[in-house]
Image (cartoon, rainbow, N blue to C red):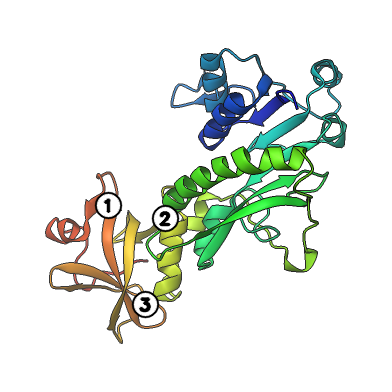
Amino acid sequence: MGRLKTVFMGTPEISVPFLKKLNELTDLKLVITQPDKPKGRKRKLAPPPVKIEAEKLGIKVIQPEKIKKNEELLNKLKEINPDLILVVAYGKIIPETILNIPKYGCLNIHFSALPKYRGAAPVNWAIVNGEVITEVCLMKMDKGLDTGPIIDCIPEPIELEDTAEDLFKRLTEKGLKLLENSMFKYVEGKLKPVPQNEEHASYAPIIKKEDGKLDVNLSALDIHNRVRGFYPWPSVFGKVNGKTVKILKTFPSEKTSDEKPGTILVLDKKPYLVCGDGHLLELITVQPESKKSMDGKSAVNGGYLKHGDRFE
């Protein structure tokens, strides 16, 4: 078999390693990414990470405003006549008119144990929900949202201290191996896509800032999982004495208290949060309003967290 002719569709930083790997493995003809977006206080237009990398690699980039009913885009793809299109976090649902163009279809790397956690934020919600194992999957796309048949998956354990950032890194490494090993086996007919079991399907919606609002009535483990799952953004946050404090790193303690949930206790110069189940959650790293992140002891010494204070 000759070198595969491919197209890549992706937008954010997480897509970049897959763009580079596809360029190594195949004859990459075109990169499709989202339009430049305004950023910063001055709202200056900034290119997406995939565009920056593609231009470094010398690959043609296009940034259509819309991909549905876009005749110019369809004609371009038909002209290229790719063997397959790889999609990694492009940011829009791919219409059937595009899905049907490549000989071997459109493939997608998804960071969950499909059919669980379909959608925009599978890594985050897997951690928030206390999962202890996840997967990265290579799937053949259909017109649904992450509903296509699965070509291959690699499992990855989730440790109690893993943040979304940690897990993303490891899943990316395994996803690159998956692409390298399983894409060609699929093209050669050695791996057959298997339909997903709809009975086990769940959804991982896009994260909103308000998802990070601290609920002190949750258990210590549930709050710990939210701190990990929402790091680095939006983080878990609440107000202490009228000022916002971000909680960036925690660990569940064996200690318990009869104090009201939300109360801060200082034990051995370390701050703890009384949670809804009566267990204490150690506040290892926090960020008081208008300050840099600091360890719990420094927050106590600086007067940002005092014994008896409460998260509102």
Q: Is residue 162 left or right of residue 34?
A: left
- Residue at left offset 68%, top offset 54%: 118
Above or below, 168 against 22 in this view is below
Disc 2 target residue: 163
| Mark nearer the N terminus (3 vs 1) | 3
Label 1 Cα neighbours within 10 Å, binned few <14 / some 14-19 / many ≥20? many
The CA span between labels 3 and 1 is 20 Å
Q: Amino acid at mark 2?
A: Thr
Above or below, 48 against 214 in this view is above
| Mark nearer the N terminus (3 vs 2) | 2
| Mark nearer the N terminus (2 vs 1) | 2
Disc 3 target residue: 261
Q: Amino acid at mark 3?
A: Pro
Q: Is residue 172 left or right of residue 291?
A: right
Which type of secondary structure does the marked residue at label 2 adopt?
Answer: loop
Q: Nearest the camera: 284 or 53? A: 53
Asked which quadrant contains residue 65, the reply is top right
Which type of secondary structure does the marked residue at label 1 adopt?
Answer: strand
Q: Are marks 3 and 1 in contact (CB under 8 Å)?
A: no
Q: Amino acid at mark 1?
A: Pro
Disc 1 target residue: 288
How far across and how far down the image is residue 111, in percent?
A: 59, 50
